[in-house]
Image (spheres, rainbow, N blue to C red):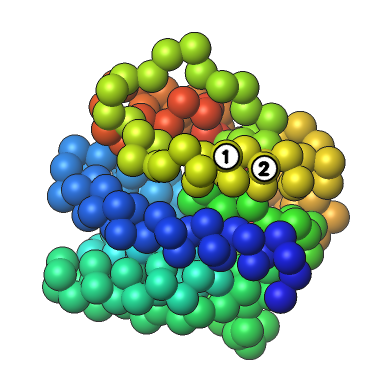
Amino acid sequence: MEAIKQRMTDYWTQRVDSFLALRIKEFEGEKHELWLDELKKYIPMDRKLDILDVGTGTGFLALLLASQGHHVTGIDLTPDMIRAAEKMSGQLGIPADFYVMDGETPDFKEGSFDVIVSRNLTWALPHMDKAYQSWYRLLRKNGVLVNFDGDYCREKAPMALPKHHAHSDIAPGLMDEYEHLKEALKDGQQPRPQWDRQLLARAGFSQIKVDTSVWYRIYGQMDEFYNPTPIFTIAAYV
């Protein structure tokens, strides 16, 4: 495993317990419907689809989509995150399949999925171009990639945050490592989501839509789930 990927895995291993608790609370709260509304803009809910959630973490998006009747597979590079996703699946009573796997090169047959989703993953990939190429090959004709992410490697430290927010549980040493990881990845990236458009087009995607207003709809309130980095949605079609 590349050194940067090992560091990323170590970082998320240390965050898994508090991250799981937060994601369960998010799933059971009002954010559930907000995220589902965003997904419904791009993913048909009137028929069962094969969906891959890359960088699933504790399985939030995977289980959200599985709750709508889809067959969902979630993958993550961090083994403890996959164990947490299985735990969350059991606790919520929503079935989904979870595997430890590198999101840049998922080990599935070409054309295995109707939809690929991802949330807050691509900023952390050292080879984003390779990931988009791999994901394109995994999608069936008329399939769609829905990617929620932010330009995290270029984010500025917020002037003020509420007492309870998405990063309030992170120990100072882990926050330092988070900043070091962003700095290590920054030189290999260009401003996003503009850069994503270029990479997706090169990978073969035809229609590419970007929505930068999703952040206001999801994080309009400074609550315990608040993310100070403006996120965007990219929907790219095969």
Q: Is residue 113 left or right of residue 201?
A: left
Residue type at numbered disc 1: Asp
Q: Nearer the viewer, residue 230 or 7?
A: 7
Q: Which residue bears the numbered disc 2?
A: 180
Element type at mark 1: helix
Residue in the picture at 42% in, 13% down: 160
Residue 155 in the image: above or below residue 121: above
How packed mark 2 is, by other alpha carbons closer than 10 Å (few <14, some 14-19, many 20 or more), is: few
Q: Nearer the viewer, residue 194 or 26?
A: 26
Residue 167 in the image: above or below residue 55: above
Q: Is residue 149 shown to the viewer in this render?
A: no
Q: Is residue 226 left or right of residue 7?
A: left
Tell me the tag on residue 117.
none
Q: Which residue bears the numbered disc 1?
A: 176
| Quarter of the image where one finds residue 131 | bottom right
Q: Is residue 185 shown to the viewer in this render?
A: yes
Pinpoint residue 113: horizontal percent, then vertical percent.
Answer: 53, 75
